[in-house]
């Protein structure tokens, strides 16, 4: 399915998504008819859809928007919404909750579209980018307007800014606040969960202890180079408490407070996303492989057809024509019948795809010998053959010898039963 | 009827639960650990990582004479003989073996120096290298991963399920549980073919339940524990017939800081430096009032009486033992003063009595005389003469539940009605009552949890398996 069709589909589901969203908002005790009404929801939902549409029109649609400008453009309608919400007295915590829940409901729908997986997965990635960017911008905007309303407080005084607290705790991504010593001074609930650590363990820890060496190096470099207010993005490998590693996307922002530098890190466990990307790559690879295989198959079918034709011609010459002559020469009706039966089956097998081998040797056999062969093929023992044909053991043995000779099996290790198994009699 | 089945089901991912799981997994093929919180480790991972062991290698190196008998005697003295002696003896006897297991088997790193904690006759406390219980919990979690023991987070024990004979057959849980919302999550029944091990820790954070047991512990008293230290699993065990033991014996920590929440970084400062190498004084009088190295019960009782407000003071020499000093200073939990005068002004302590207190304490130490409060004066103790001085403001916080359910030496839970074990039901760690009696000595919980966790794990996995369904 094309991306725009997917977005269209999402639009059609708006009502369901709204209901799901409302249910979840209600579950977290965040329902307020003034703010959680359908009308506002529709507008915000439309904003997200518009951003997704815009993604699709970018020339390099499979790549993330590279510059902040691009992203700014995508997130614009949503940021407007945040402004709107704030003017109506929504607090930041609430807006983020509102917005995260909305994104998560849409995401759930997309992930559920298994039949459109590669596209849907791409769209999920885009959705997250839009969400990340919107969030960051909204948080920054909210904070910028903060100081007039909230008194300044130092961060290291044990109790810290209520506003920061709200941001920290409500956001559905992990957030870590790191000071100049590389020490984590705050961590939200989600960050604790990502790393499997309690707040008491994560606060006070060195940020580097949560990353592998390469990631720690990269992050430290970013932090050192970064100017106030700047933002950077890195993909790194992190460590879970039990030593397991996982891929993570980190967005770092430097913000100076009370003359001290702080870096806020938004961390997202990318295990799922990476798995999706891998799935996407694998899907692509698979399609390519299939194309290649298909071409080879077509070629070999063509070849097979030619082989087949020449084999049929040869068989007719070597087995069927002599058979016909034999029938012509045969005096006895029953012998003719037997030869006819062989011929008939061989003709059938010619077109039935050669599951069973034609053996010109079979046409050399006498009627009695064919009878003996049939019994052998059916798995009868020597004694059973004697009984069935009312022949002495010696006679049957003679027949066996002759059959072997005519079939060219003399001196071969091949057992007669096995040889006859795949032959048409 | 059952959604899943394992040989052994462990509830709780602290010291006791993980030790049990690791031992059990050596003897059976499927073990699962269920944990209600979103992260593993409970109180264990935020603990100070202090580990008491009698007859340890560091004691041998430092020529400190110690024995399990001496450790047991200390436990009984602090516990006012309320201890279930057999259980306490097992902890003392196995303390060093278990310490060595953490070193040799799990690769836990300890600092090369012992600490002398209050109530212990001798220095016998190891410190993890990172000054935290996480130094033990992390290697245990790594081991669980290596041994294929899943730790299922956000899974809440809602009830124990008995079979027709009254033996425990499984547990009722809520998966995708979001603490503390009891309605959250989805119900599920998990069967244990061999046994269930309860290792859900204490209930210090359960303000309602603890006030029922000890009405003096009102809601406004702070707590050092992780948020999940609540009583519901204890209640499940009692409902299943377990015997309650000394539930009202709830310990307060005398060393916690007034200037931060919970255990923080200040508690370790007091425990490792403030109390052993410094003095504890009452702000209002500027005088000492207790043996700083007494057990916690004595300390707290003294601190809470007659409206005292306490601070601990240590000088530059003593402060070297404080492994969390840097963070304490950074967070403003410990403050630094260039002189006793400066300290007195900043903390509003009457100066003259404070100076007198310091002077008489110093004479005591220099002359090696007996302290009237009974503080042991070891030979290496230094007088408080080297500025700068460091000071922490203290407040007692609820810390540990000595009470819990009754087990026997095999860690089997004992049925209240029959005094006999409840079949296929084990418990270990802080959920168990009786080991420490009326007061637990610092650094004795880790050995207790690990010793009985391992006993419970090995015994649970030796039960004859029920047939699969
Ligand atoms: C801050 C602090 C510092 C300490 N420092 C030391 C020290 O240095 N040395 C020492 O010896 N002792 C110390 N102690 C005491 C010691 O850490 C604890 O007694 C010990 O960790 C208890 O271990 P546990 O395994 O029994 O319980 P915990 O480690 O608390 O683990 C129990 C787990 O069970 C889970 N749980 C509870 N109920 C349920 C349920 N219904 N369903 C599912 N899961 C559930 C909990 O969430 C928890 O994760 C300290 C305690 C604290 C709080």
Image (cartoon, rainbow, N blue to C red):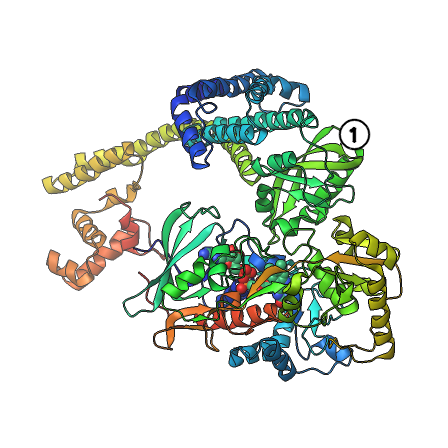
Q: Would you say residue A292 is visible in this rendering? A: no
Q: How many numbered discs sit on the rendered protein?
A: 1
Chain on which label 1 sits: A
Q: Nearer the viewer, residue B133 or A384?
A: B133
Q: Residue at x 69, y 56 (%)?
A: B257
Q: Quadrant of residue B361?
A: bottom right
Q: Secondary structure at mark 1?
A: loop
Q: Residue at x 38, y 29 (%)?
A: A310
- Give neighbour class at mark 1: few <14, some 14-19, many 20+ (Cα, 10 Å): some
Q: Nearer the viewer, residue B294 or B87?
A: B294
Q: Position of residue A195 (x, y in %)?
A: 60, 47
Q: Which residue is mark 1?
A: A227
Q: Is residue B25 left or right of residue B354?
A: left
Q: Would you say residue A382 is visible in this rendering? A: yes
Picture quarter with ligand 1 = bottom right
Q: Quadrant of residue A306?
A: top left
Q: Is residue B299 left or right of residue B280?
A: left
Q: Quadrant of the N terminus of chain B?
A: bottom left
Does B305 appear above or below B177? below
Q: Quadrant of the C terminus of chain B?
A: bottom left
Does B153 appear above or below A294? below
Does A347 appear above or below B117? above
| Label 1 CB-ligand 1 distance < 8 A | no
Q: Quadrant of residue B93?
A: bottom right
Q: Is residue A276 left or right of residue A146?
A: left
Q: Residue at x 76, y 40 (%)?
A: A220
Q: Position of residue A11 (x, y in %)?
A: 43, 19
Q: Position of residue A417 (x, y in %)?
A: 27, 54
Q: Position of residue B19 (x, y in %)?
A: 54, 66
């Amino acid at each position: 399915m094309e991306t725009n069709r997917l977005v269209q589909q999402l639009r059609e589901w708006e009502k369901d998504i709204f209901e799901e969203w409302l249910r979840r908002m209600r579950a977290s005790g965040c329902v307020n008819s003034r703010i959680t009404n359908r009308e506002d929801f529709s507008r915000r939902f439309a904003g997200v859809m518009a951003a997704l549409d815009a993604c699709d029109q970018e020339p390099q649609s499979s790549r993330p928007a590279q510059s902040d400008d691009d992203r700014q453009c995508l997130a614009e309608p949503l940021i407007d919404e945040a402004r709107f919400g704030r003017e109506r007295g929504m607090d930041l915590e609430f807006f983020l909750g509102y917005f995260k829940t909305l994104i998560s409901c849409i995401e759930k729908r997309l992930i559920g579209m298994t039949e459109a997986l590669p596209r849907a997965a791409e769209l999920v990635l885009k959705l997250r980018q839009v969400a990340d960017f919107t969030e960051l911008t909204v948080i920054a905007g909210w904070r910028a307007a903060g100081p007039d309303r909230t008194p300044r407080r130092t961060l290291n005084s044990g109790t810290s800014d209520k506003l920061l607290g709200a941001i920290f705790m409500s956001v559905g991504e992990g957030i870590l606040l790191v000071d100049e010593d590389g020490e984590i001074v705050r961590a939200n609930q989600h960050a604790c969960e990502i790393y499997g650590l309690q707040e008491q363990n994560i606060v006070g820890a060195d940020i580097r202890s949560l990353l592998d060496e390469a990631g720690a190096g990269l992050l430290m470099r970013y932090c050192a180079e970064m100017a106030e207010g700047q933002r950077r993005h890195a993909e790194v490998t992190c460590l879970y408490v039990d030593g397991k590693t996982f891929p993570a996307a980190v967005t770092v922002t430097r913000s100076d407070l009370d003359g001290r530098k702080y870096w806020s890190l938004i961390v997202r466990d990318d295990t799922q996303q990476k798995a999706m990307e891998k799935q996407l790559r694998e899907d692509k690879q698979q399609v390519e492989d299939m194309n290649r295989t298909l071409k080879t198959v077509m070629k070999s079918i063509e070849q097979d057809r030619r082989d087949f034709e020449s084999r049929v011609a040869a068989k007719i010459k070597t087995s069927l024509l002599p058979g016909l002559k034999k029938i012509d020469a045969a005096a006895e009706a029953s012998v003719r019948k037997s030869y006819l039966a062989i011929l008939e089956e061989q003709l059938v097998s010619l077109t039935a795809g050669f599951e069973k081998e034609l053996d010109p040797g079979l046409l050399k056999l006498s009627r009695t010998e064919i009878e003996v062969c049939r019994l052998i093929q059916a798995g009868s023992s020597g004694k059973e053959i004697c009984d069935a044909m009312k022949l002495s053991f010696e006679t049957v043995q003679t027949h066996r010898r002759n059959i072997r000779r005519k079939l060219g099996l003399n001196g071969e290790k091949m057992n007669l039963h096995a040889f006859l198994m795949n032959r048409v009699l | 009827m059952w959604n899943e089945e394992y040989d052994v089901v462990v509830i709780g991912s602290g010291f006791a639960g993980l030790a049990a799981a690791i031992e059990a997994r050596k003897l059976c093929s499927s073990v699962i650990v269920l944990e209600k919180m979103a992260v593993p480790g409970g109180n264990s991972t935020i603990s100070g990582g202090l580990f008491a062991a009698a007859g340890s290698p560091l004691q041998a190196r430092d020529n400190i004479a110690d024995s399990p008998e001496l450790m047991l005697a200390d436990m009984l003295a602090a516990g006012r003989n309320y201890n279930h002696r057999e259980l306490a003896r097992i902890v003392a006897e196995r303390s060093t073996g278990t310490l060595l297991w953490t070193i040799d088997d799990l690769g836990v790193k300890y600092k090369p120096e012992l600490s002398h904690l209050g109530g212990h006759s001798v220095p016998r406390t190891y410190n993890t290298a990172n000054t935290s219980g996480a130094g033990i919990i992390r290697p245990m979690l790594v081991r669980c991963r290596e041994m294929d023991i899943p730790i299922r987070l956000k899974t809440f024990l809602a009830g124990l399920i008995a079979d027709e004979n009254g033996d425990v057959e499984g547990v009722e849980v809520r998966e995708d549980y979001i603490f503390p919302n009891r309605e959250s999550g989805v119900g599920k029944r998990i069967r244990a073919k061999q046994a269930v091990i309860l290792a859900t820790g204490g209930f210090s954070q359960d303000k309602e339940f603890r006030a029922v047991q000890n009405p003096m512990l009102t809601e406004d008293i702070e707590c050092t524990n992780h948020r999940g230290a609540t009583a519901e699993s204890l209640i499940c065990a009692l409902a299943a017939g377990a015997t309650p033991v000394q539930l009202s014996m709830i310990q307060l920590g005398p060393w916690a800081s007034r200037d931060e929440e919970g255990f923080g970084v200040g508690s370790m400062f007091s425990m490792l430096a403030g109390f052993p190498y410094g003095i504890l004084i009452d702000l209002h009088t500027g005088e000492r009032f207790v043996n700083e190295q007494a057990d916690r019960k004595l300390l707290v009782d003294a601190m809470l009486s007659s409206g005292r407000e306490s601070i601990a003071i240590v000088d530059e020499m003593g402060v070297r033992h404080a492994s969390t000093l840097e963070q304490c200073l950074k967070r403003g939990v410990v403050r630094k003063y260039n002189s006793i005068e400066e300290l007195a002004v900043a903390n509003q302590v009457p100066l003259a009595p404070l100076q007198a207190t310091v002077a008489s304490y110093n004479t005591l130490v220099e002359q090696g005389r007996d302290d009237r409060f009974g503080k042991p004066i070891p030979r290496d103790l230094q007088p408080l003469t080297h500025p700068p001085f460091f000071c922490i403001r203290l407040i007692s916080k609820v810390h540990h539940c000595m009470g819990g359910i009754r087990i026997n030496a095999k860690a089997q839970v004992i049925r209240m009605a029959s005094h006999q074990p409840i079949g296929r039901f084990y418990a270990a760690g802080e959920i168990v009552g009786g080991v420490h009696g009326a007061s637990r000595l610092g650094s004795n919980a880790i050995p207790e949890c690990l010793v009985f966790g391992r006993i419970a794990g090995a015994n649970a996995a030796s039960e004859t398996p029920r047939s699969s369904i």
